[in-house]
Structures are given as C-alpha cells and as structure tokens.
Image (cartoon, rainbow, N blue to C red):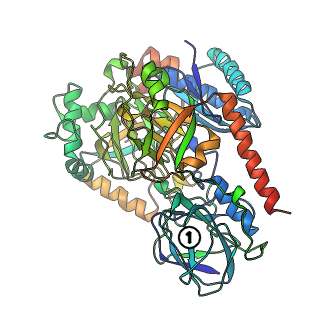
Amino acid sequence: MHIKVIKPGLATSVQDAGRNGHYHLGIPPSGALDQYSFRAANLLLGNPETTAVLECTLLGPQLQFGVDCRIAVCGADMLPLINGQPQATHQVLSIAAGDMLDFRPATAGVRAYLAVSGGIDVPEVLGSRSTYTLGTLGGYQGRCLQAGDMLMLGRSTAEAPAGRSLPPALRRPLPRQATVRVLPGLYDHRLTAQSAERFYQETWTVASESDRIGYRLKGGSPLQFRPREAPFGAGADPSNIVDAGYPVGSIQIPAGKEPIILLRDAVSGGGYAMLGTVISADLDVVGQLPPNQRLAFSAVDMAEALQARQQGQAALERLRAALQG
Amino acid sequence: MSIRYSFGGDEFLFAEVSESMSLTACFTSMAITGLLRQQQWPGIVEICPANASFQLRFDPDILPAAQLLQLVQELEQAVQDSPQTLDTRLVEIPVWYDDPWTLEVGARFRERHQDPQSTDLQYAARCNGFDSVDAFIAAHSGAPWFVSMVGFVAGLPFMYQMVERDRQLQVPKYLSPRTATPRQTIGHGGCFACIYSVAGAGGYQMFGITPAPIYDPQQSLPYLADSMVLFRPGDIVRFKPIDQQQYQAAVQAVAEGSFQLDIFPVRFSLPDFLANPQAYNLSLPGGHHAH
C-alpha cells in the first residue's frame, strides 16, 4: 500500500483543501494552489472531493507504485507516462504494482494534481494534510518530497472506471495571457493617482522567484508614493507600514519595485504597503502562471468580485454534477 | 480617532486602528478581535490581531461583507468604554547576546547592510546613541516587551518595548533581506523586536539567540504541549541575558526534553502602565527578584 519516490521533481508536495483558523499565529491556509483542478482530479477518480493529492510543479516526480490503484492527473499539461508509455491527462489511469510513473515537463500551466484512489495518507495536522514548508508542518514530514520517501495510500472507497475522462469544457483553461481581477484597497491611497492607475494598464511578467508563498512580478513601472512623514514604527521607506496582517491574494509593493501576490502559503503579515487583493475567484489562476508569462490586472468592485465568486461556484457545481451520481 | 476599514478582496476585512504604533492602538485591536473570538459569529474564518491593525477572513456566502463591517463598527464603539486591562502572562526568554551564530550569518551578508564595517549590535547601539554594545544590551533587556502581533511565519512574535516613545529602540532593517537567519535569533526592525521561530529569510538586525524553542510542530517540550506556538498577542516578554555556559546547558536541556521557561501570570493595566511605565515595569513579577 505504498508509493516509492524515485525522483522528487521540482517541488512536489502533499496538498488538500488547506487549514483554517491558525492564520493569527502565522500559519497560512496552504492547500492546492489550483483548488478547482485538485477537486477535479479527485472527483474524476471517485475520491471524496478534498482527498489529499500530490501537487507537482513544472517538472513532475518519478514514482514507483507498490500497489494496484487508479490515478488521475488534472491541472497543468504535464503528460503522465506509465512505464515510459505516454498517457492522457484528465483521465482515469490504471496502475499495477511495480509500475513506474513519471511526467513530461509542463507545456501549459505550472501545477498538475496527481490524485490516487484512496488518497495520500499522511497524518492530519491542525485539520489538514497540506504541506506548509516554511513551518515544516503537515504533508510528508513538513516538506516537499525527496528521493526515497515512501508514501502510504488511504483505503479506497470508490473506483471510477479506467478511461473515464474529464470533458474539455470542465478543465481549467490555461491561457497564454492572463488577466487577474483585483479589488483595489488596503494601502492604495498611499500611491499617487497616476501610479495607481498605471498599475492596471501595464503588462507584468511572472518572475522566476515565484512559489507557493508568493508570485513576484517584473516588467512594469516602479510605483510612486505620495509624500508623507513616516508614522512612528513604520520605517523610513515610503512603502513601509507598521507591520500588519496580509490578506491571502494581497499585492504588496516593497520599495515600490516588484509587486508580490501572496498565495496560499502566504507570510501572514509584514511591513509593506499593499495596493489591493486578487479576488477569490482568480486566486487559482495565479498559481498556474509559469515564469515569464505575461499578465495584466483589472480593477473590479465588490459586486463584480462576488459575481465572479458565484460563477466559480457554479463551475464547481457543474463539475460535481458531471462526475458524481 | 476612528478605524480605517478596507476590504482585501471578497474574503478579508482589513482594519487599520492607527497609522503609527502605540500600545493604545494595539490594545484596541486586541479588544475588538477578542470580542469577535468570544462571539463566534458564523462566517468569520480567521481573526488576526496585529500591531496597530487587525484583519478578519470571512465567508461572504454566510456573512455578507456589509453586515460584517457593520458588526465590527459596532464593536469599535463598544470597546471605547471597556476597561483596558488584560489577564496575560510574563515569559522570561534567556538570550545569549552577541553570539557566534548570528555574528557568523551577519558577517556573510555584510554587503546587504547599511554599515558593513560594524556588527548589527554595534550599528544598533550607535543608531540609538549608546556609547557601547553593553549599554544597548542593558536597554534591550532592561525593560519588558509586549507581544503586539504573532505572524509573518508560524509562531514569530513581534514585540514592542514597554517604555516611553522617546526611549524606544529604533533600527532600520537590512538594505535587502538575508536569505538566512538562524532559528531563534533575536531580531529588530523599526521599533519592533522579534524572535525568528524558524530558520529562513529575514531583514531584521540580529542581536543574539535564545536556546528556547518557541514553535515546534512536534510539541516535544512541556510548555508547547497545549499549542505548537508559544506566544499569543498580549504576552509580556522579558529578555534575560545569559552567557555561553548557560546557553549550552539550556540547549542540552532542550535536547533532553527537560527545558523549562519561567512564566508568571500578570493582570496588565494599560492606564496604570501609561501613567508611569518604569514604576509599573518594576511591579511586574520575575526579573530582578527571580534569583
């Protein structure tokens, strides 16, 4: 009942829906960055929707299975190979004990979710199996996989037939140019009006220093702050604030230079001004943007954010309707 | 002065009590978030007090944004008349100041520092008008600190020293962050002290190291049995200088699982403290009469 890790891949970790209720102690939600694709992989396989999976990043792992089981790979286009034979993504695949699974590098998107019938069985920590590497918490020993690790599988409750595939209309789109919607606010009043506006007009590029904690962006103009007298305790740089909480999805602008979008392994707070927050419906999209991909931001209001949220929920409902029952 | 509210996307409400740091602002943040924690409103997912602000994560499908805002604004009014006292505890943290580990890491990242010729402690002493590192350490360990926020990474306390504003120790952060900081380093940036709960990146000046784990997912020490995170906002910390021998003995005790911290219950009164900080600090338990 195990999987042996032969090669770990670039950054492969156990993830699920994440944990709530501990952000005030600096422990972020964690969980699959692309929640839609993670749920799709489980539902396709007939697992409960939030069963723990492996999140594979750009270069997938090489795994040897010690047990017969079924798997599904959703999210980024990372073609799975069983014993060297190319298979399909978004499809239920049969694995026999002794089989070797590896992946072609991602050709679109960043994160593929490998769901296994029964799920990856690691202990629940604070209500979740998700890995939070900064805090060496959860997942497999609190870290990304390494060669030689042995993953245990849970007991499978439901088995979808091999060959079942996810209709293309139900797969996460992986566009070449993304537009991410942002609710402006937090400390955007510290920016000059011209600079605040220009942020949404320019095209940005995902920097290579982007990970589950945050995505760093390059290529836009430096942001300009209104002059001020630094408040006591804030620090002298115009981008400094008295250290405060950071919303997941917030966009901070250290020294006004390279904006950083915080994702699900966010640092929970710090001393940099934020100009707004990516709306919840678009947070999944960010984690699928590869380095050097271009993106733009569009400003929305709360009503538009909530409408997008409802559309996201409706998409999940369609997924459940198509794959359950 | 009223709180500035701003929504962080469709799931966060951010509330800035004050642009500048003060214990009064921190107390307001703790009072409102404390009430919210007691009231257990459905739809509030995270309650995060911070130094002079707080943020809430909510589920707008259960608790609409406008309703949450109204609820918090009512609490803002309610806490204006509430007594500014806090049942908390004082934790004594042993510190080996000017230790070899933070000195070594500091030396490795000198090109990111304002003053590559000095150590972080020498620089901080000079920034604050002290004529020696020893005098700076005496000021750092001479008055207790108030845990005004926990976060950045798991279990990291931000601490604000319990002295008048003109006696606050202020030091800029590194010009650009280090990629390494030893675990349990005593750091300082702006007016805040911190203890790095885990090894990793950091931009605060490094003054010393404590043998005491403050975050441990394995919960192997008795004082972390209830929670893997030691500190809560509102805790009071006193740094107790120790030497190399005491440090090594403590590290040994940690390894054996027998290490203990001195922790005293305290009823903290903000008005009494503000009326005379020095006298108030002398009335706190531990410290000068602990040995």
Name the residue nearer the viewer: B288 or B64.
B64
Residue B117 appears in which quarter of the rendering? top left
Image check: B259 left or right of B229? left
Residue drawn at x 38%, y 20% is A232
Residue drawn at x 31%, y 58% is B248
**Quadrant of the image containing the C terminus of chain B:** top left
Q: Which residue carries the number 1 mark?
A: A79
Count residues near mark 1 (Cα–Cα under 10 Å), then give few for <14, some for 14-19, many for 20+: many
Say whether residue B37 is visible: no
Residue A23 is situated, as x and y percent measured from the top left of the image, at 57, 43
Residue A74 is situated, as x and y percent measured from the top left of the image, at 63, 63
Q: Is mark 1 on a helix, strand or loop?
A: loop
Question: Please, is residue A113 above or below residue A239 in the view?
Answer: below
Image check: A249 left or right of B44? left
Question: Please, is residue B166 above or below residue B153 in the view?
Answer: above
- At label 1, the amino acid type is Leu
